[in-house]
Image (cartoon, rainbow, N blue to C red):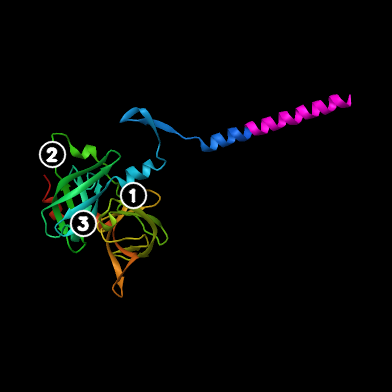
Amino acid sequence: MVKRLVVYGLLGIALALSTFTSFSINSEREDTEMIVIVNPRNPLNPVVRNPYQEEYERMLYPVVRITSDSGTGTGVFIDVTKVTTVTGGYIITAAHVVEDENMVSVEIYSDTGCRIQDAIVVITDTVKDLALIRVETTDSTDYADKIYKAKLAPENYTPYIFTPIYTVGCSLGLNPRPSQGIISVVESDHWEVTSPILPGNSGGPIFDGRTYQVIGIAVWVKVYNGQLVTTMAGVVPINQIYEFLNHKEHKEHKE
């Protein structure tokens, strides 16, 4: 009888351990399960889905590197159809990025790679330090359908100090890259942010960290004793972007 109890006891312990181990393995598998999708360029080679694909599409892909005789800067494709009747591939940037030039080169990024395209400078506003440029199409297809466009925040967007933000720009002339920070100063004509901004970021978008909407354009950084203070950057706020887009001179350039 004692032997049977011992055997049954050992069997019970073994069963419990097996169940616990099975549960642990299942839990671990559930925690580490990878979601895969089919690679559109090679259906036989599945790829792991990027968990930040939404951030790529809404904040990274709309950003372009602008090259002119003055150097390199940053711009962002925006949807201006709700602001004016202008349609097509339009990019907003800083006026000092394009200077007095009529044509610049832009590098456009997406999940399929990068392409270089010419763009026409439509209008500049040196007071606000904003410029609008238009991508030239090279084929019969509407090029605007092939690009990602960033969403503008509402014109009445209310900024608050400590609001989390993302800055995306072509720092040092490199490919677009994001940095994170907060709104640190709110003035009537400009805001300041703490996300690191380096040369090459000028004209790059500032995104609300919660909605991924454009709330400003980076235009300057402070200098102290001849050194750039990269975490004290000036931003043209969203309400001035709307004023710029609705300006009468801009309307004169409609096609």
Q: Amino acid at mark 1?
A: Gln
Q: Which residues are magenta?
A: 1-22
Tell me which label, 1 or 3, sits earlier in the chain.
Answer: 3
What label sits on residue 255 in the rendered view?
Answer: none
Q: Nearer the viewer, mark 1 or mark 3?
A: 3
Quarter of the image where one finds residue 240: bottom left
Which residue appears at 55% of the width and 34% of the height?
29
Tell me which label, 2 or 3, sits earlier in the chain.
Answer: 3
Residue nearest the observer in this picture, 217 or 83: 217
The residue pinned by badge 1 equals 213
Q: Judge whether 161 appears above or below 40 on screen.
A: below
Q: Specify the quadrant that holds the C terminus.
A: top left
Mark 2 secondary-structure assignment: loop
**Residue 195, magenta (yes or no):** no
Residue 102, percent from left and from top: 10, 54
Farthest-out residue, bottom = 225
The residue pinned by badge 3 equals 72
Q: Nearer the viewer, mark 2 or mark 3?
A: 3
Residue 20, percent from left and from top: 67, 33
Q: Nearer the viewer, mark 2 or mark 1?
A: 2
Farthest-out residue, front = 3
**Alpha carbon distance from label 1 to label 3:** 24 Å
Tell me which label, 2 or 1, sits earlier in the chain.
Answer: 2
Residue nearest the observer in this picture, 225 or 218: 225
